[in-house]
Image (cartoon, rainbow, N blue to C red):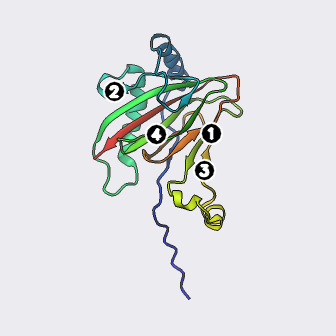
Amino acid sequence: MKIDHQPLFPTPLFEITGLEIDNEKLAKDIYDLQKKDEGVKGGYSNEGGWHSNVQIASEMDEIFKPLIDNLIKVLLELEFSPKIKQVDNLVLWANINSKGSYNTTHNHPGCDLSGVYYVKVPEGECGNINFIDPRPALNYGNCFIVQRYVGGDSIPRFPVEGTMYIFPSSLQHSVGTNETDEDRISISFNLNIR
């Protein structure tokens, strides 16, 4: 007998650590940005907290340059075939999630990759990012597959300061409630690749 395990339709999730970014300075700069940018109200997934206006690559505030420089390096090293040669339509926004704020389930249409970088992460239950299985048919009745083989219909990743996640923009995700008394600060981004 021969068993050849062939996982079909894998969904890439890249976790990047060890980036050279001064998170304390970046957090301070984001708080300063919040003072002059009233942010986006409604229409997005965030419930509570502050979501800056979207920053377009060509007009981006200087505070995001260290993150962008690191992100471009990372993207060119990702294990894609063919390799990424060019990044287009890069946009990002800062998030300050205070106590009680969270993000409902959503994805990021109109782009190829999305991601989040954690600038400041308080100790305690500050809100995991939860990735939802992109194969909805598995959630309709086949408990064996979902629970024993796949591991459930939602997989959490725990925020760690200085960690970046990159994933397909179509991948549904949510962020749990920040139950701490401190802010969680992150930067989210969308982009297209060639």
- Could you tell which of marks 3 and 1 lies nearer the N-terminus? 1
Identify the amino acid type marked 2. Ile
The total number of labels drawn is 4
71 to 152, vertically: above or below: above
- Could you tell which of marks 4 and 3 lies nearer the N-terminus? 4
Which numbered tag is attached to residue 56? 2
**Callout 2 crowding tier (Cα within 10 Å): few <14, some 14–19, many ≥20:** few
Q: CA distance from mark 3 to mark 1?
A: 10 Å
Q: Quadrant of residue 121?
A: top right
Name the secondary structure under disc 3.
strand
Q: CA distance from mark 2 to mark 3?
A: 30 Å
Q: Nearer the viewer, mark 4 or mark 3?
A: 3
Which numbered tag is attached to residue 155? 3
Of residues 180 and 101, which is closer to you in this image?
A: 101
33 to 193, vertically: above or below: above
Q: CA distance from mark 1 to mark 4?
A: 14 Å
Q: Which residue is mark 4?
A: 115
Which numbered tag is attached to residue 128? 1
